[in-house]
Every structure is written in C-alpha cells, then in structure tokens.
Image (cartoon, grey):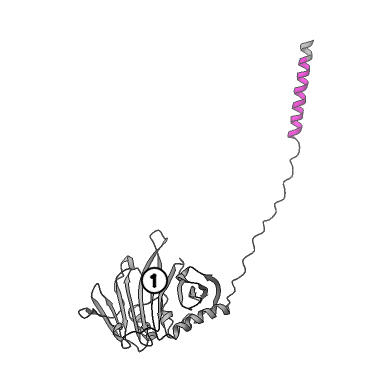
Amino acid sequence: MGRALALALALAAFIGQDAYAQQSTQQPKAPKRPQVAKKEAPAPPPVQMTIEPKAIEILKAACDRLAVARSMSFTAVVTYENPSRLGTPLAYTTKSEVTLQRPDKLRVITPADGPATEFYYDGKAMMAFAPAENLLAVADAPPTIDGALEAAFKTADIYYPFTDLIVADPYKAVSDGMIMAFYIGQSKVVGGTTTDMVAYADNDVFVQVWVGTEDKLPRMVRAVYRADRARLRNQLEISNWKLDLDVFGEAFAPVNASGAMPIEFSRPVTGPPPAAAPPAKVKPPKLK
C-alpha cells in the first residue's frame, strides 16, 4: 500500500505539472507595441549668401595697403594638391621671391620645387628664363603689370596664385563677383602674429584669408574651386613683406642670361616633371 500511495502521489504531481505546462503554452501572447514612425531630422537651413561689413572692412584694408605701396617684395610659398594613384591627394610646393615696382616692373624668381624659373618684366618686354637649361624667351609686353600678367597667362600659361595681391586694384580683383563674405575670428598662429580670418566666395572659388590685425598684410590664403569635385586645396603663404623699398631698374632683367638659347615665348609643349606638377585647377587673372 505504501508503494501504491507513493506511485499515486507521483502520478498526480506529474499530471498537475503537465496540465500547468499546457496552460502556460496556450496563454495568449502579449500584443506587440505599435511601431512609431521615426521622425527625420529637420533639414539644415539654407546657407544665407550674405556679405558681412566686418569681413569687407578687413579685406578692403588689406587691399588698400597693397594698392598704395609704390614697391614691394615678399616670399610666396604655394602648396597645392593633385590626386595620387590611390585617389588620395598629394601635396606639391613651390617657393617664389617676388619684387615689383609700380606701375611697370615685376620680378618672380622660383628656385624650387621643380625646375627653377625666372620671370622679368621691365615695362616694355617680359622675359622667362630657365637657368638650369639656359633657355630664354622674350616677348613684347603691355605698359603695366596688370597687362603683362594677363599677356603672360594668355600667351604662355604663366600664372601666379598671388596675382590678385600685386595688380593695381587688389580689392576689385578680390570682390569682383563676390556672393558671400563673413568674419571667422582671430588666429595667433599663422605668420607668427595675430591675424583676422575672413572667408569669401564667388561662383568659382571659396577662399579663406588670414590678414595681419595690425599691419593689414595677408599672411595666408586657402582656396577650393567649385568646379573641382575632389575639393583639392590650394594654399598660399606670404612672408617677408617689405613695402616701399628702393629697387633699381637692373633688378628686372636676368643677370646671367647673356649666352642663353632663345626660344619662343609660348605655351609649354611637354608637361613638367612630377615634382612640379601644376595644380588641377588654376584661377586665371580677373583682369579685364
């Protein structure tokens, strides 16, 4: 009887557990929470194409300082990007020593990187000299620096990123077609002095410039061209500014080109070596 009772109790417990398990599995599932549509982040407001008076004030002060100088010299270091085989851009650099006397004298000596070149303009002729190859090209030129720069670009693709700084009216060159300008703030790093940062743009290029707070001289310029899908950057650093210095006429002619081989003043036929690859986009002078 003891064994029978124990067996009956065990059977009853098993039946009770099975009934509970069946009851548990047959219970209705909790209803799913309704899916709430995610709210999309609001679109950023459109950029306001405004021209801030403070930005214009800084730009105009810098341009006026350059325009009234009867002579000047500076060092220009240009860094520009070209895509590598992997697509990631590589940076190339050139350095130029610039001297001018208004209205009709200009000298640009570019010793590196790439082939050394020298450009001279004396009010009557413009000369391009390659000292390593001992080649000299000479052409008649207009009677002003602006005209000579435009002629050099059209005739021989000679272009300098600092062109807007040395023309007779720098502010006109900078502001022509401007659609936006704004003040960014100050920097104490660029040029070893305090500078005011300004950004401005026209339909072709977006520019950021650093201008000395005290002396109103440009220290650095960065540009990205709108037509360039890769958004390659072009940078110009300007140092060693000297304004209204005494310059003699013989400074605007090559001193060691007497035995150079004459060549035509025209566009180059072959491309330069990789160390001096030209930038993907260049901004031609805004001269009329």
Dot 1 amino acid type: Val
Q: Nearer the viewer, residue 265 or 76?
A: 76
Residue 241 horizontal side relative to residue 48, left or right: left
Query: Residue at 31% across / 81% down in the picture?
Result: 120
Q: Position of residue 97 (x, y in %)?
A: 35, 75
Residue at 56% over, 75% down: 182
Residue 39 position within the rendered picture, expressed as x and y whole percent measured from the top left: 67, 58
Residue 101 among those drawn in magenta: no
Q: Residue at x 47, y 82 (%)?
A: 63
* Extreme residue toward the top, this view: 1
Q: Which residues are magenta?
A: 6-35
Image quadrant occupied by the N terminus = top right
Q: Looking at the magenta stretch, what is its main secondary structure? A: helix
Left or right of 213, for residue 94: left
State which quadrant residue 6 falls in. Answer: top right
| Residue beneath disc 1 | 77
Mark 1 Cα-neighbour bin, 10 Å: few <14, some 14–19, many ≥20: many
Residue 13 among magenta residues: yes
Q: Which quadrant holds residue 119?
A: bottom left
Between residues 225 and 185, which one lies in front from this camera angle? Answer: 185
Image coordinates for residue 183, horizontal then vertical, percent: 55, 74
Figure disc tally: 1
Q: Secondary structure at mark 1?
A: strand
Location of the C terminus by quadrant is: bottom left
Can the viewer see residue 51 in this picture? no
Residue 177 screen position, x and y as percent: 50, 81
Q: Look at the image and tell me whether residue 14 can be seen.
A: yes
